[in-house]
Amino acid sequence: MADPTNKLLSGACVVTGAGSGLGRSLARRLAQSGAIVAALGRQMQPLEETASGHRNITPFRCDVSDPVALEGAFADLRRVIGPVSILINNAAVYPKRDIFDESQKSFMDTVAINLGGTFGATRLALDDMTDAGFGRIMNVATFADIAPLPASSAYSVSKGAARILSRALQADLADRFPNIVITDWLPGMLDTQMGIQGGVNPDDAAVWGTTLALMDDPSLNGATFEMNREIPPPRSLKKKLKDKLLFRTPPAPRQL
Amino acid sequence: MNYLPDQNWDVIVIGTGIGGGTVGRALAEAGKKVLFVEKGPRGHRRERTPLSHDIFVPEARLARGLWPARMRGIVNGKESHFFGPLGSGLGGSSTFYAATLERPAPHDLDDSAACPHPGGAWPVSYAEFEPYLSRAEALFHVSGTPDPLSPPPSRELSAPHGMNDVDKLISRRLQKAGMTPYHLHSAIRRLEDCEECLGIKCPRACKMDGRSAGVEPALATGNAELLDCTEITRLESEAGKITGLVARRAGEILTLSAPVVVLAGGAFGTPRLCLASTSEAHPNGIANASGLVGRGLMFHLNEMLAVWPGLKGDAPSKSVGLRDFLCKDGMRLGMVQSMGINASYGEILHYLRQRLGRSRLGGSRLLQEAARLPASLAAILLGEAKIFVGLMEDFPYDENRVLPTDTDEIVFEYRTSTELHKRRKVFRKALRTAFRGQRHLLLSGAPELNYGHPSGTMRFGDDPASSVLRADGRTHDLSNLYVADASFMPSSMGVNPSLTIAAQALRVSEAILQRGSDG
């Protein structure tokens, strides 16, 4: 099922947080689809489990909240596989902590992984992508920032900030590098350790995620997908009215 | 690598646009040790950054190779602030240009009874200048068909890629109207999958500009280096020679020096630097004994024209040029050319808005919004328009000038003369005649200055009292200071300036090499 014409498959496909849950499913599905996957995670053993039986997955131990470790892992994976053409920012933690159990230190530790790790991996991947002139970054995101649940302050804040980061990257990159395509993907409620019982099987979600990650389409820059469909950007009442007046129809949301 | 500022350079070139890139390349290829100093960054080779006026954060502009600050233009006494189409990065403004490298006509340099020259002839005749045009055409891979109305080039041009159907149709109709169109001269090599990077940075060495045809080949010789993100703030001199260049790099002040210095910061940048370099010996700035540094500022006048060929398909007109009224009844007008863009709804809207912006009612947002409806109606009724521009020659007046500032703001004063308005009227009439028989519309309202084509602010000439530079590009006042950018031009010509800037840069490199061997 690998598409030999897809230039995104030419380099390394980095999946962070690939030792469990959705990250593992994504790494495997991407490898089955022809990607050469660098699986990043904090512990070697689960990463090796992710890779077992998959020729195209190489594990790299790395805590994404540690800038030095992240830089080392990228240097290693470039040497072993090659320059990065796809990055899936998936690594995240969701410590359920009441505000009275959260300290500045514990709060910032979560931010360092969910936001800092996303920024760090993106920044490193951009070095390769700007050299090539193209690349694909998919950020696994949530709506946790819209209506934060109790005992979720650090998660809600850091994941919300990560969505702002996607928009900030658009502002910095979209005009200069229209072929470095950045998309937020909300996989939905998953049946994983971090998710809920009875949620979507991460293997099923990974099918959508992989399809989206391998789409070589500049118009996906800045787009947001939830599960298998696009969430169009919000339109103000004024904009809706103006579109009506000028007989403009907004483009229909895309389906994976 | 040793610290660049401390190495022994034969020549320091300030600025890396068409002029700086070309002079530095010629010198490096001749074995000289050349240091390019560029105010902006080297940039990313694969970026496709467009020339954008939407980005206004100075740091973000500079990161993209755009001039960081707004310009302050005082035109006919009225002040306005805007972002000019100016670069500030490796390749200068040229990385964003449309790579139309047209030759001047003989009368652009020479005086004649049939077409009197506005400031007297150039100190170099067309016949002397022509071989350098040919050399520049070779360096920039220029292709096109010779203009039937001009003398043939001494070296044959590369064959163009052929016109598309739109261009063929428009050309046929122009011919029917008695015009003599030809295939424009372009420095785009059309490598495989060429995206014709008009107005954007080309991610490959396909569009030839100050970077791809200048600095990059210079660096490839091993004789040149680039010091980017470094602004020269002041020239220091002693006994008629430049002795040092004061520079600012990452907040630090450093001093550079070399036996020969070439200024190539463009028709705004170069006089700004000279005027800022005041001292007891040079109270009016360096190289300014004539008092003419910064003066004689010229632009071209853009006359925008929409043409509806009535063909299906959305290919823009890219390659039609005509020079039938470069000089009409002794009156200097200018050439006409395809701009390579369609006027979609958005572009027509932009123009209508610009015109509104200049009118007294322009401030009203409501009116700006109202312009949308007629524009969309026009787009539906007429389809996509092909945009042409007439570049009308501007004459030099000493009161039109660049003023020094100690910030990045570029300030200039400019007045449109009665003579200009008169020629414009004739030009517009001539444009309408040329395009009769095809649906067209002149888009420009008030005279529209082409801020991408500034020139004349350090003009060359034989008389030190009436010019800043000698014929070979060296300043009259300082024995080791040269200029190789659009500021040397004593008249603005009726064609795009880039090829002429490159040709003069080659002459400057030759002068530097010759004097070097003379000792």
Image: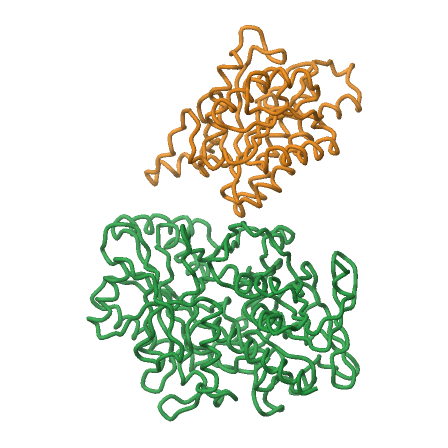
Chain colours: A orange, B green
Residue at image position (37%, 70%) is B390
* Residue B243 higher or lower than A197, as above or below: below
Q: Nearer the viewer, residue B304 or A53?
A: A53
- The reply to whether residue B403 is visible in this rendering is no
| Residue B328 pos. (x, y %) | 32, 82
Q: Quadrant of the N terminus of chain A?
A: top left
Q: Quadrant of residue B388?
A: bottom left
| Residue B139 pos. (x, y %) | 49, 69
| Residue A64 pos. (x, y %) | 69, 28
| Residue B372 pos. (x, y %) | 37, 49
Q: In this rendering, would B267 be left or right of B189?
A: right
Residue at image position (62%, 59%) is B69
Q: Nearer the viewer, residue A187 or B72?
A: A187
Residue at image position (53%, 43%) is A174
Q: Quadrant of the C terminus of chain A?
A: top left
* Residue A163 higher or lower than A27, as above or below: below
* Residue B449 higher or lower than A84, as above or below: below
How many numbered marks, from 0 up?
0
Q: Quadrant of residue A95?
A: top right
Residue lying at the far top in this picture: please name it: A198
- The reply to whether residue B427 is visible in this rendering is yes
